Image (spheres, rainbow, N blue to C red):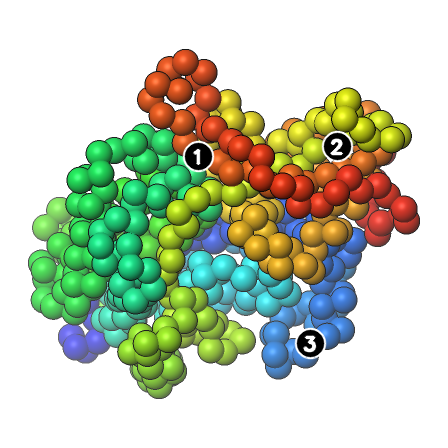
Amino acid sequence: MEWFTAPELWMGRTVFQRGLAVLYCVAFLSAALQFRALIGERGMLPVPAFLRRTTPRRSPSLFHWRYSDRLFATVAWSGAALAAALAAGAGDAVPLPVAMAAWLVLWGLYLSIVNVGQTWYAFGWESLLLETGFLAVFLGNDDVAPPLLVLLLLRWLLFRVEFGAGLIKIRGDACWRKLTCLYHHHETQPMPGPLSWFFHRLPRPLHRVEAAANHVVQLGVPFLLFTPQPVASVAAGLMIATQLWLVLSGNFAWLNWLTIVLAASALDLSALTGDHPRPDPPLWYVVPVLAVTALVLVRSHRPVRNLLSRNQAMNRSYDPFHLVNTYGAFGTVGRVRDEIVVEGTRDETPGPDTAWLAYGFKGKPDDPHRWPRQYAPWHLRLDWLLWFVALSPSYGAPWFDGFVRRLLANDRDLLRLLRHNPFPDAPPTYVRCRLYRYRFTTWRELRDTHDCWHRTYLRDLTPPTRLRTPPASSPAS
């Protein structure tokens, strides 16, 4: 069955599987350590309330059977443990059916989390992880040579990720066509990294080169994935290099790393590793591979129509299992950066002389003196959603009031998501949220003040608010 396998890509498969398992582990750990304040029984958007509004058909999840915070934690920690085992090579140490079952369990567990995660899990890279994880079920292990059809499906997924992102940029914002978006993007992106200040301060001609290179890699190179080797490997290598550039310039959870892992599956490393012959795959394995290939091809018609549409959607799933989705990023680029600064006080009657103390967040900018940190591939969900609320308060409509109430109660689950709580001994009397305009400092300002940010007060997003009724929360002991 030479037509069915691509033995020269066995190392690419290994790198892909180990890398995907690591990212699964990060995703499950992120869920385990953040869920209680976000979607737990006493969270801002509780899963039990959501389950009463939906059905298993609309949102498949094992939590329809039963939900408790303890069960959710069990699912998340079990997923992390299984993913860690696969990252360590357990998938190649067990028979092929067991390895396939392990990947299927990972996919099912994470699907169960995403489908009850609501707005906290409404990110394109959640669907990307699920679609990639579903295809990984059929990629086999060291018992068989890599199936060519599944490898081509992974390239088709990578094509949609890159080409979709390239198209939506060209269609969505004139600055991409003028090659000027990167004059702003490094400063206004959702969560800058430790090198973002330096990227922003690059000469503008280099920003134009960055934008032009991005268009080449996203709009032209993806077609080369379907050409013979070594051209396909060169195309994958260019995508990996571009994604590493994005990793250095910002924090986008596991989006860039998952794209790198997908590109690794297209690399022909046989010149370095030598031949790795494997026996012909059994018929029981060939049949489901053919079936999933047909399924993906049939379900690809809607993503293709979206790619061809002038009204292209950026990130969308077309079925509750997140099997074949559409992707895109930064169809528009902000020209200015607004940030929410959250403050509290213990004064009983706030006035002009009130001392307000600021809460500190892990990823989003707050203290102008604090340099951005590197968090990706970790996903700071609260920080990301607060960035969206700064763009438009409507993004926080379902949960923002609960966020403020929990600060007023010193909710321990919420406080674990913050970097700094200025009220460790007793909760504040009032909390307010203010909107500031942030920009990166200039070279001279950095030299004089050592601040990487300069900020200007715009307005109060919420007035001083105090706790009138006890929240459904877990107060600090």
Q: Which residue is mark 2?
A: 344
Q: Using the numbered discs, state the Cα–Cα distance from disc 3 to disc 1 in whole angstroms.
A: 42 Å
Q: Quadrant of residue 406?
A: top right
Q: Is residue 92 left or right of residue 386?
A: left
Q: Is residue 295 left or right of residue 351?
A: left
Q: What kind of residue is marked 3?
A: Thr
Label whose residue precedes the other's in the sequence (2 or 1) = 2
Is label 3 in contact with label 2 (beta carbons under 8 Å)?
no
Q: Which residue is mark 3?
A: 54
**Quadrant position of the N terminus in the picture:** bottom left
Which of discs 2 and 1 lies nearer the camera? The answer is 1
Q: What kind of residue is marked 2?
A: Gly
Q: Position of residue 295 (x, y in %)?
A: 38, 83
Q: What kind of residue is marked 1?
A: Arg
Label whose residue precedes the other's in the sequence (3 or 2) = 3
Q: Position of residue 407 (x, y in %)?
A: 76, 40
**Which mark, by number, is residue 439?**
1
Q: Using the numbered discs, state the Cα–Cα distance from disc 2 to disc 1 in whole angstroms.
A: 24 Å
Where 157 sits versus 295, above or below? above
